[in-house]
Image (cartoon, rainbow, N blue to C red):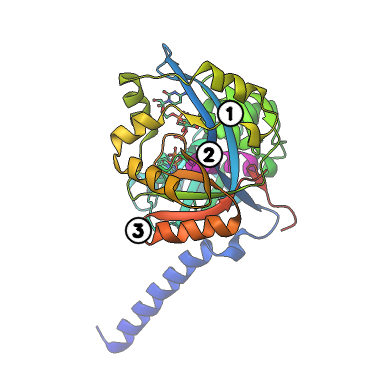
Amino acid sequence: MTENTQRNREAEVNLLAAAREAQWSAAAFMGPNAVKVVSPAKVNLLLSIGARRPDGYHDADTVMHALALHDTVYLRVQPASEDEVAQLAEQAAAGRVDIALGGPAGNLAVAIDLADRTGADLSVPAADNLAFKAADALARALGREGAEIVQLRIEKHIPAEGGLGGGSSNAAAVLVGLASQWGVSPDDARVVATAQALSADVAFFLQGGCAQLGGAGEVLQRILEPSRKAVVLVKPAGGVSTAAAYRAFDEAPAPVSAALLQAAAAAASADGVPLANNLAFAAESLLPELAGVRAWLADQVGAENVLLCGSGSATFAVAESFAEASRIATAALSRGWWARPTSFSGLRAAVVPGR
Ligand SMILES: C[C@@](CO)(OP(=O)(O)O)[C@H](O)COP(=O)(O)OP(=O)(O)OC[C@H]1O[C@@H](n2ccc(N)nc2=O)[C@H](O)[C@@H]1O
Ligand SMILES: Nc1ncnc2c1ncn2[C@@H]1O[C@H](COP(=O)(O)OP(=O)(O)O)[C@@H](O)[C@H]1O
């Protein structure tokens, strides 16, 4: 190969890399076909798991609260020809691109760029991403049979397997983003039913703020006044799988006391809800380091209440102020844990207006 041919080949490769990069750049997500969607984290102020049902799920009475900590989902929808989608399907089947095919007629091609900013380097194949499952389910629910390409860029600040609901929140963000692109209200009954069918946490993120949910955790019961307090989150390196936590729970189920449930039911605002989580014991049996995190947080000056986030592995403490939350987070980081100061918020999965 001559020096010139070599240089041309390198230039070609660089151009290809630049074109690929440009496809995911911020500019690619501007314009009428694109939206930016905020995708918040949650904690469960109350998580009261009950009996295992015949369908394998458990009854759940929970009060969830959105946090200011959030992922950002950029979403672009492009009409395409059937040939284009068929070509993408062929390339995906050959393993050349990571694109998932969904919709009622395999007509929806979904490409996902997951940019993990939590330091964990999360990697999920497009077909397994909850964001794809949401796009697929909504396209089916709305009977959208036309060929379309959906491009998603998910900037993750919420650590996975933390009990912070990041994946579910991304799914809710995709429902809301696609609904806006497809001319449907986010409160449309088909969007709500799709969220509920996906999971309890997805259903919550359509509502956001502070809410009490029943059923298996997907049935909205009532809305509570959100808290304005600061929160510190601490998570050790390991995660807890939600399904594994529920399995461990079944080996030693212990109910939340009736008095506590009554106090939660009587609370009109988030600040009046007593903290409780009867999945915590099961999660600690799976990841014993969690007991150490809990004890350490409870010892910190300025940390008022300490509780495991859902099925773990993050733990939260309500802090006296954002400054206190930041100070505790810094101390936790120096112990090698992931930690963030944040606050309770009234956020829900919602399109950011005016872009
Ligand atoms: C525990 C909670 C608290 O909000 O969430 P995380 O803390 O994991 O985020 C929820 O109950 C989780 O909700 P979500 O994460 O949406 O669960 P799903 O994907 O529907 O279920 C994952 C698995 O958990 C088990 N599961 C979930 C919910 C439920 N009420 N009973 C169950 O037994 C099932 O084994 C299921 O296969
Ligand atoms: N968009 C996504 N973001 C994070 N995790 C996802 C996503 N899609 C699928 N997952 C998978 O779901 C698992 C649990 O994710 P997540 O919802 O963040 O945890 P949790 O239920 O503990 O809050 C991850 O380990 C990952 O494999």
Q: Assign the C terminus to one quadrant of the image.
A: bottom right
Q: Residues within 10 Å of mark 3 (few under 14, many from 20)?
A: few
Q: Residue furthest right?
A: 354
- The image position of residue 107, as x and y in percent, is 52, 38
Tag 3's secondary structure? loop
The answer for how far apart the CA atoms under marks 3 and 2 are is 23 Å
Q: According to the image, label 1 marks what residue?
A: 194
Give, as a single range, the part of the protein colored magenta: 164-178
Q: According to the image, label 2 marks what residue?
A: 43
Amino acid type of the residue that numbered disc 1 sits on in the rendered structure: Thr
Q: Is residue 219 visible?
A: no
Figure check: 313 above or below 29:
above
- The image position of residue 124, as x and y in percent, is 39, 47
Amino acid type of the residue that numbered disc 3 sits on in the rendered structure: Arg
Q: Which mark is residue 296?
A: none
The answer for how far apart the CA atoms under marks 2 and 1 are is 22 Å
Can you tell which of label 2 and label 1 is closer to the viewer? 2
